[in-house]
Amino acid sequence: MHATDILDTCLPELCQTMHASRYVAVKAAVSSTLAERCVSVTGLGRGVGSSTLEKYNIKRMDRLIGNPRLLGEAVLVYGEMTSWLVSPSTRPHILVDWSPVSVDGRFHVLRASVPA
């Protein structure tokens, strides 16, 4: 399932208190992250598929990231998505992977996932 499809399936019920334009901006940020593979403010703004100028998309992402209400809502959304993805009646198996990112082994990534 595509990330934006998960947002469309899961978040409308969970984000009833979230302002509609902030919800649309979050979806745009997720789509941009998937398209550009970059999570900087400018990268997010450049990846937004909108007919407006790039400058305004960057400003839009900057306002979203700097929004203090989004931080509070994120904790609630993460909790609800976790209970949606992992049934509360089961004990989930969490796979943890420690992998080198750079060739010289100086940088690593620690990734946790829940198998389907």
Image (tube, rainbow, N blue to C red):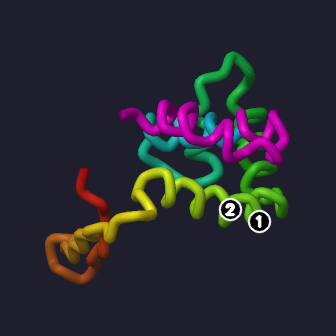
Determine the residue located farthest toward the top in the rendered image: 51
Report x, y in % for residue 113. Answer: 30, 63
| Residue placed most toward the observer, 4 or 48 | 4
Which amino acid type is shown beneath numbered disc 1?
Gly
Q: Position of residue 13 (x, y in %)?
A: 68, 40
Q: Residue at x 74, y 21 (%)?
A: 52
Image quadrant where residue 7 sits: top right
Q: Amino acid at mark 2?
A: Leu
User: Secondary structure beneath disc 2?
Assistant: helix
Q: Residue drawn 68% across and 30% down?
A: 54
Of residues 86 and 40, which is closer to you in this image? 86
- Label at residue 76: 2
Q: Is residue 71 left or right of residue 11?
A: right
Q: Main secondary structure of the magenta part?
A: helix
Secondary structure category for the residue under label 1: helix
The reply to whether the C-beta atoms of the residues labelled 1 and 2 are less than 8 Å apart is yes
* Mark 1 or 2: the one toward you: 2
Write the residue at 54% across / 33% down. Answer: 9
Cα–Cα span, label 1 and label 2 = 7 Å
Callout count: 2
Density class for disc 1 (Cα within 10 Å; few <14, some 14-19, many ≥20) is few
Residue shown at 59% from the left, 57% from the top? 80
Which of the two residues, 14 or 22, is positioned nearer the viewer here?
14
Q: Position of residue 34 (x, y in %)?
A: 44, 39
- The image quadrant where one finds the N terminus is top left
Q: Which residues are magenta?
A: 1-24
Q: Which residue is mark 1?
A: 72
